[in-house]
Image: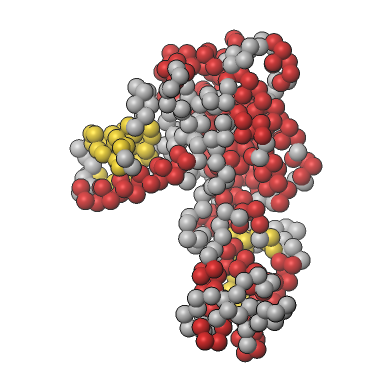
């Protein structure tokens, strides 16, 4: 999730700004706070995990105490964003791609018993998405306190489900709660550190089994009689609705980023394909293992590859890209979720081929990175992965046979030409630095990369 800061300007107004690392002069500790029009409002220097103000637009009226509280939060967001291995260079704050008609939204309120939910999970009618859960595991205290709340007959917050046309259910909000309830009913953990039921339920499991002592019959009955309030998004609702609702009401302790939300709502087949792409050794080698899997950044960049590869395959260019990255990836996720694993497997092989070509033609230290000649000097700062360059080079290089590329070209054949092009072409550098998800920026970068291929790649 991109780092964003909100600052007061001109008294009562506020402005959302994105920090962008200013590496044009080779000083990689300088950040500019940029608005959606690419205007810089403040220059900051990062030193010892602290942001210091170098210069500021006089129209910023945030008081110093509040400003530095916000900057302390911002530096943590910057560090987390850069730990993903990719640049925080998209300065768009909001997206306005074709909103859906609110009159078409159909959400039905229903009651689900705990026994029915358990049965639906067992029958695979509700998918708890175990791959996603590995990154978000509640502590034993959190799990026990949830079960204690149910035993105390305290109503839980509303669950949100999305019903697909085939009747299967995806969980929009409440994934961790359902997982905890299911694990408890499967006797996978005892209740610990209870607050109100310590004397009667501490150390107890759901039921007696293999020496494990279950909760007393009274609590067992109460638990099984529990009814959950669930809002179910009807399958006739626009596909965008479930993504929008998820972003608005997700109640997890740590807000999910956009790819984590897509993962929750994607089909098992698509999740399998994206996972295969992210786990390719060719991908890890080409990116020098820089793109981390922790917040699914690796799968998000693989999904971007599919999005733009399909555009090129249908139109030879990416000119039909609408400029709204997140909504485009949401729509693509929904569309690809209708296909089987076998129908999607060709993306894995195309991705693998592109990664091998990129590693050969640029080297793993420089592939997909916004480099100029000064970055190629031994000991220079290692640039982060640039998502715009990743999209352009991966899609273009997927079309060239790897063995033929190796046979006809020297190792790192495109590295110096790319570095010189970024240095000499001011527009190219700007388009790779600010607003990198916009249509104009990506189309320009794609054309420049394609031009470099035609000039310097023997084929």
Q: Nearer the viewer, residue 102 or 42?
A: 42
In the rendered structure, the answer to whether residue 233 lies left or right of residue 369 reads right
Whether 406 is drawn above or below 154: the answer is above
In the rendered structure, the answer to whether residue 404 lies left or right of residue 34 reads right
Residue 109 position within the rendered picture, expressed as x and y whole percent measured from the top left: 60, 71
Whether 127 is drawn above or below 239: the answer is below
Q: Nearer the viewer, residue 348 or 161?
A: 348
Evaluate whether residue 287 shows in this view. yes
Residue 32 position within the rendered picture, expressed as x and y whole percent measured from the top left: 33, 34
In the rendered structure, the answer to whether residue 49 lies left or right of residue 394 reads left
In the rendered image, the residue lying farthest to the front is 211
Residue 359 position within the rendered picture, expressed as x and y whole percent measured from the top left: 62, 24
Quadrant of image for the C terminus: top right
Identity of the residue drawn at 61% across and 57% down: 133
Identity of the residue drawn at 58% across and 40% down: 298
Residue 383 position within the rendered picture, expressed as x and y whole percent measured from the top left: 46, 28
Q: Nearer the viewer, residue 270 or 74?
A: 74
In the rendered structure, the answer to whether residue 435 lies left or right of residue 72 reads right
Please say which color scheme the image uses.
secondary structure
Identity of the residue drawn at 20% across and 49% down: 63
Whether 276 is drawn above or below 30: the answer is below
Whether 389 is drawn above or below 97: the answer is above
Q: How many marks?
A: 0
Evaluate whether residue 32 shows in this view. no
In the rendered image, the residue lying farthest to the right is 342
Identity of the residue drawn at 50% across and 30% down: 386
């Amino acid at each position: 999730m991109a780092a964003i800061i909100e600052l007061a300007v001109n008294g009562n107004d506020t402005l959302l700004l994105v920090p962008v690392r200013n590496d044009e002069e080779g000083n990689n500790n300088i950040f500019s706070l940029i608005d959606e029009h690419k205007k810089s409002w403040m220059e900051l220097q990062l030193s010892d995990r602290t942001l210091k103000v170098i210069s500021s637009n006089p129209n910023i009226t945030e008081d110093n105490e509040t400003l530095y509280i916000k900057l302390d939060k911002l530096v943590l967001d910057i560090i987390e964003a850069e730990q993903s291995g990719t640049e925080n260079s998209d300065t768009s704050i909001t997206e306005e791609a074709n909103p859906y008609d609110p009159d078409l939204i159909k959400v039905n309120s229903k009651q689900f018993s705990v026994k029915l939910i358990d049965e639906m999970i067992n029958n695979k009618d509700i998918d708890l998405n175990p791959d996603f859960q590995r990154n978000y595991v509640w502590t034993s205290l959190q799990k026990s306190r949830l079960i204690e709340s149910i035993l105390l007959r305290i109503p839980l917050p509303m669950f949100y489900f999305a019903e697909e046309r085939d009747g299967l259910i995806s969980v929009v909000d409440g994934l961790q709660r359902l997982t905890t309830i299911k694990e408890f009913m499967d006797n996978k953990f005892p209740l610990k550190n209870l607050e109100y039921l310590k004397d009667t339920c501490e150390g107890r499991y759901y039921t007696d089994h293999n020496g494990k002592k279950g909760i007393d019959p009274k609590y067992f009955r109460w638990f099984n009689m529990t009814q959950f309030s669930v809002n179910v998004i009807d399958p006739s609702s626009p596909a965008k609705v479930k993504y929008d609702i998820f972003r608005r009401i997700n109640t997890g302790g740590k807000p999910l980023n956009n790819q984590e939300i897509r993962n929750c709502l994607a089909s098992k087949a698509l999740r399998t394909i994206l996972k295969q792409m992210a786990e390719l050794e060719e991908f890890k080698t080409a990116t020098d293992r820089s793109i981390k899997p922790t917040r699914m950044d690796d799968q998000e960049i693989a999904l971007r590859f599919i999005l733009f590869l399909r555009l090129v395959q249908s139109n030879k260019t990416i000119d039909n890209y609408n400029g709204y990255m997140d909504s485009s990836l949401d729509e693509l996720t929904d569309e690809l979720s209708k296909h089987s694993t076998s129908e999607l497997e060709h993306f894995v092989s195309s991705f693998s081929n592109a990664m091998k070509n990129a590693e050969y033609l640029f080297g793993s230290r420089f592939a997909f990175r916004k480099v100029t000649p000064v970055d190629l000097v031994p000991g220079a700062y290692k640039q982060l992965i640039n998502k715009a360059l990743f999209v352009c080079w991966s899609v273009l290089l997927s079309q060239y046979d790897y063995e033929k590329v190796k046979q006809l070209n020297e190792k790192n054949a495109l590295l110096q030409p790319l570095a010189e092009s970024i240095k000499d072409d001011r527009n190219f550098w700007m388009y790779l630095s600010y607003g990198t998800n916009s249509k104009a920026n990506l189309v320009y970068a794609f054309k420049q990369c394609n031009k470099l291929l035609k000039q310097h790649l023997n084929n």
